[in-house]
Image: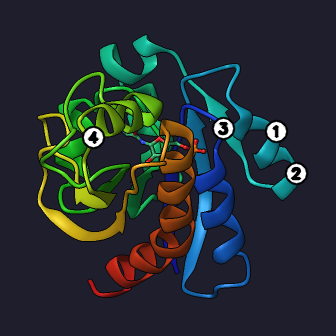
Amino acid sequence: MKELAIFASGSGTNAENIIKYFKSSNEINIALVLTNNPQAGVIDKCKELGVECKLFTREEFRDNDNVLNILIDAKIDYIILAGFLWFVPAALTKEWSGKLINIHPALLPKYGGKGMHGMNVHRAIVEAKELETGITIHHVDNIYDNGGIIYQVKVSITPSDTPDTVAAKVQALEQEHFPKIIEKFCLSK
Ligand code: GAR
């Protein structure tokens, strides 16, 4: 059994979808969800789904080994960032090198980097009158949105699209593809 941890900072629709997808898997177990945000919707979602959700502080993440040790104690094989907004420290990217992946709501390298998350990305894309957007699932290293790309899929943008409708299109792609790519990725190693 591969043990997975999910990091999420927000509403947790991806985390919920991933947990449901692997619920009856006998190859992949979502052992733990971690969040930096006491207000995050993902906390209640985990309660409903019966998955442990741990809240941590910036100090526990960046300045000491508390989060690292939680992950080591839970024997985590892979880490999935699903709407997690903090920069991941080198201790984690080193320990889970090649086994730590993120989803980004655009076609990297476009619309990536610090501050480019969630609705900020969709607003920028509509403002720039892009004709397409999509999702990128990629490795995480020590530069924002820089790690090797594992998977991308595109969707068209029409002149009538707004940041909200673009967000809905991207969310539909995330729901359809992210769990399947996680499955392929974790079981291919
Ligand atoms: C998702 O769209 C994800 O791609 C994005 O945050 C959203 C989280 O939604 N991630 C980033 O912007 C990372 N830079 P969720 O909490 O409902 O899963």
Tell me the CA gap for discs 4 and 3.
23 Å
- Kind of residue indicated by mark 2: Glu
Mark closer to the chain start, 4 or 1: 1
Evaluate if marks 1 and 3 touch, with contact meaning CB atoms under 8 Å apart: no
Find disc 2 in the rendering and name its residue: 48
Find disc 1 in the rendering and name its residue: 44
- Kind of residue indicated by mark 4: Leu
Residue 82, image x, y percentages: 48, 48
Evaluate if marks 1 and 2 touch, with contact meaning CB atoms under 8 Å apart: yes
Q: What element carries label 1?
A: helix
**Residue neighbourhood size for the residue with mark 2, other residues' Cα within 10 Å, grouped as few (<14), some (14–19), many (≥20):** few
Q: Is mark 2 on a helix, strand or loop?
A: helix
Dot label at residue 11: 3
Find disc 4 in the rendering and name its residue: 92
Q: Is mark 4 on a helix, strand or loop?
A: helix
Q: In this view, does 150 lie to the left or right of 116?
A: left
Q: In which quarter of the image is residue 150?
A: bottom left
Residue 141, image x, y percentages: 15, 44
Mark 1 CB near ligand 1 (8 Å cut): no
**Residue neighbourhood size for the residue with mark 4, other residues' Cα within 10 Å, grouped as few (<14), some (14–19), many (≥20):** many
